Amino acid sequence: MAQEMTFSIIKPNAVKKNAIGPIIGKFEENGLKIAAAKLTVLTRPKCEEFYAEHKERPFFGELVDFMTSGPVMLMALSGDNAITKNREIMGATNPAEAADGTIRKLFGDSVGENAVHGSDSPASAERELGLFFEKSEFVNQ
């Protein structure tokens, strides 16, 4: 298995539900480590940069409004096949279609407010981690 690092966000709706601990527990019980973490409120420019690939989509403004509406937990997760494992733990984008026990099934409210984000590829993970963390901040790999 390949040791990897991936990027994860616990979104404002899950933070508001006080679900940071249970969500981190899901990552840890599935073999992922928290390599770095920050609780913050995203600025609009940083959020727009993060979601730049969606800029032309009709939901872009609503997505940015939601993601800047309250605190988020930014995390670097490390472990064997961390990218794929994280995506499995998160579940389907639509919480109504997510498997029982996945984070989105447990804590998501809708497709737009689905509790968590996770990188979908090694290239995305590298770009997203680089937007929010300095290499020196990765301490638990």
Image (cartoon, rainbow, N blue to C red):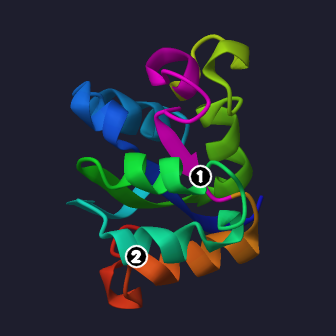
Q: Is residue 60 above or below residue 4?
A: above
The residue stretch that appears in magenta: 104-119
**Total numbered badges shown on the rendered structure:** 2
The residue closer to the viewer here, 45 or 81, is 45
The residue closer to the viewer here, 2 or 18, is 18
125 left or right, relative to 23? right
Residue at the spot x=50%, y=47% of the render?
Answer: 62
Q: Residues within 10 Å of mark 2 (few under 14, many from 20)?
A: some
Q: Is residue 129 above or below residue 29?
A: below
Q: Residues within 10 Å of mark 1 (few under 14, many from 20)?
A: many
Whether residue 111 is in magenta: the answer is yes
Which SS class for mark 2? Answer: helix
Residue 118's label in the rendered image is: 1
Residue 65, horizontal then vertical, whole percent = 40, 51
Alpha carbon distance from label 2 to label 1: 17 Å
The residue closer to the viewer here, 66 or 28, is 66
Circle 2 or circle 1, nearest the eye = 2
Which SS class for mark 1? Answer: strand
Dot 2 amino acid type: Lys
Q: Is residue 81 visible?
A: no
User: Circle 2 sits on which residue?
Assistant: 46
